[in-house]
Image (tube, rainbow, N blue to C red):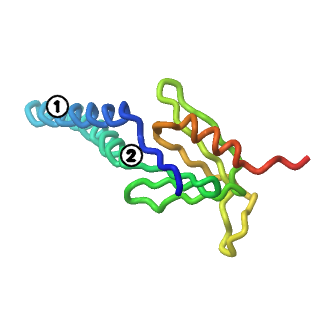
Amino acid sequence: MPATYKPKPTFYIYALLFTLATLWLGSEAWKRGELVWWIMFAGVGFIAIRMILASFARAEFDGETFVYRTPFRKPHRVDRQQLALVEMGGRRNEALVIGYYPRDENGLVTLDAMRYINCVPLEGQGELLDRLLEAMPALEQ
C-alpha cells in the first residue's frame, strides 16, 4: 500500500487568501473601472486558480513508484530506476523537486534529457525525501 502525501495546511490558507484577494480586486475593478485594476484582478485571479488546483495535488510512493497527481494533468509516474535528483527547494515554503529520466516509446529509460516535478509543499515531505533518496539507484563509478 503506497503512502499518500497531501499539501500542508498552510498551502490551503494561501489558496484561500489569494481567492479573497481576487474577490476584493474584482469588486474594486468593477467600482473603479480602470485598466490597472482589471490587470491586477486577472493576475491575482490566475495565481488563485493555480493554487486552488494545486491544493488538490497528491503524491504517492510505495517504495518502487512515485506518483504525483494534480487536477487536469496527466499523473507523473516515476519508477525508482528513473530517479536522478531529489531535493528540497524553496525558501519560505520548501517543497520537493524531483528530477527523473523519462521513458521512450518502447518503455526504456532514456538519459537524453531530464524532466522535473515541482511538488507543492507536502505534509511529511521530509520523510518522503528520505524514502526517495534511499530508493534512488546508486551511481556507478
Q: Is residue 65 left or right of residue 95?
A: right
Whether residue 130 sits left or right of residue 7 in the image: it is right
In the image, residue 77 above or below residue 117: below
Cα distance in 3D space between marks 2 and 1: 22 Å
**Label 2: which residue?**
54
Q: Residue at x 61, y 45 (%)?
A: 98
Dot 2 or dot 1: first in sequence order is: 1
Q: Looking at the picture, does residue 29 appear above or below residue 57?
A: above
Between disc 2 and disc 1, the foreground one is: 2
Q: Which residue bears the numbered disc 1?
A: 24
Q: In percent of the image, x 30 and y 40: which residue is there?
A: 48
Quarter of the image for residue 130 reads: top right
Residue occupying the point 28% across, 34% down: 18
Label 1: element kind: helix
* Nearest the eye: 102 or 2: 2
Occupied quadrant, residue 46: top left
Kind of residue sitting beneath label 1: Trp
Disc 1 residue crowd, few under 14, some 14–19, many 20+, Cα 10 Å: few
Identify the residue at image location x=21%, y=33%.
20
Looking at the picture, which amino acid does disc 2 mark? Ala
Q: Position of residue 21 (x, y in %)?
A: 23, 31
User: Which x, y percent locates residue 37?
Assistant: 21, 32
